[in-house]
Image (cartoon, grey):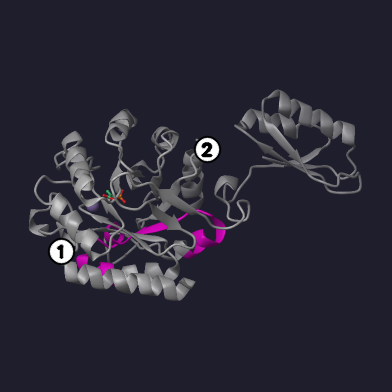
Amino acid sequence: MIIQYQAGSDHPAREEVRNKIRDWGLRVQSSKGEGDDLIVVDNVFGPVTDAHRREVASFACVKTVIPIEGVPQNLSRVRRGGRHAVTIPNKWGGKPVVIGEGQPLRILAGVCAVDKDYTKPSHEMAKRAGADINRGGAYKPRTSPYDFQGLKEDGLKVLCEARAELGLPVVSEILDVRDVDLFMKYDVDVLQTGTRNAQNFELLIEAGRTGKPVLYKRGFSNSMDEFLKAANYIMEQNNENLILCLRGVKGIGHSFRNQGDLDEIVYLRQITDRPIVYDISHSSGKKSAVSGIGNMAAAGGADGLLLDVHVSPQHALVDGFQAVDSEKNLSRMIRTWRGLHDLALGA
Ligand code: PEP
Ligand code: MN
């Protein structure tokens, strides 16, 4: 909360409020240049409750109590002195992947759902075409309980066996806090939290606590304010490896699977220091759309693009219709996306 004191309030009265706040275990940052003729404002950090706010407001020297709005300090571009990059270590033979400020556009490509026969060839194709990271879901959040839910641990095994041969780090979605140990056992390089779990705060906390890079996807019905506040749960675990991911939202009358939120790339670049990935497959839901949407996202300042690929989409267990299946097209698109990114941002 932010406390604005009455004009003419005196220092001892304000100190009384601050001592109370410190007694609650909260942190107070007082404005500089205190003087009785100035408007005095304090910032209060920590788990502030409604009761705290009410009690502070009841002091005669307090004019008003305002909840803190806007971008959380942990993710603020201004507060953190510019934009930053996240390093994804690579223990699998290849180079670490650095994504974010000052880096080339990174491509995260792979199957939507891990399958036994096509994951490795699909990931190999993505790598040959220029991908930096392979994506693959072992746990799939499905709208219907009758739909295929992912190969689960077997899927992680397949994903990680392919990784051992290909040497690229992998990103995979974690659905449940109970799976954290399993994801650590397989040493999944980047934990993805999906749109349906965007406000599953316990999951965000546990994913953050692992210290692993976390690809945090926007909830399809979440405002930017909700998105940033929830993302801050991950940073609050002393995890500096948060990567933000936009993937479209539920909108009105849109032509694709979701309503694109490409403009938020520009906004997030302005206000946060975090690397930004745009998911061009789940936002569009159409193979024919990923090229154009990728062009826009890359030119608009995304640090990475995420997409589904599959060497045999008719055999894909989930989302085959949106998977890119031609290596030639994929390499051409990746070259174009990288070129646009460099042109727009200065290589
Ligand atoms: C996915 O990336 O496989 C996925 C399910 O995405 P989202 O959570 O954005 O729907
Ligand atoms: Mn999918």
Q: Label 1: which residue? A: 325
User: What's the distance in space between the residues labelled 2 and 1, CA to CA?
Assistant: 39 Å
In this view, 116 is above or below 77: above
Name the disc covering residue 226, or none: none
Q: Is residue 25 left or right of residue 304?
A: right
Magenta part of the protein: which range? 266-291
**In which quadrant will I find the N terminus?**
top right
Q: Please tell me which residue is depicted at 62% across the width and 32% down the height of the picture.
A: 48
Q: Does any portion of residue 70 appear in the rendered image?
A: yes
Quarter of the image for residue 335 reads bottom left
Quarter of the image for residue 256 reads bottom left
Q: Is residue 234 left or right of residue 159?
A: right
Structural crowding at the residue carrying mark 2, measured as other residues with C-alpha within 10 Å and reported as few (<14), some (14–19) or many (≥20) = some
Q: Please tell me which residue is depicted at 75% across the width and 26% down the height of the picture.
A: 20
Element assignment for label 2 = loop
**In which quadrant will I find the C terminus?**
bottom left
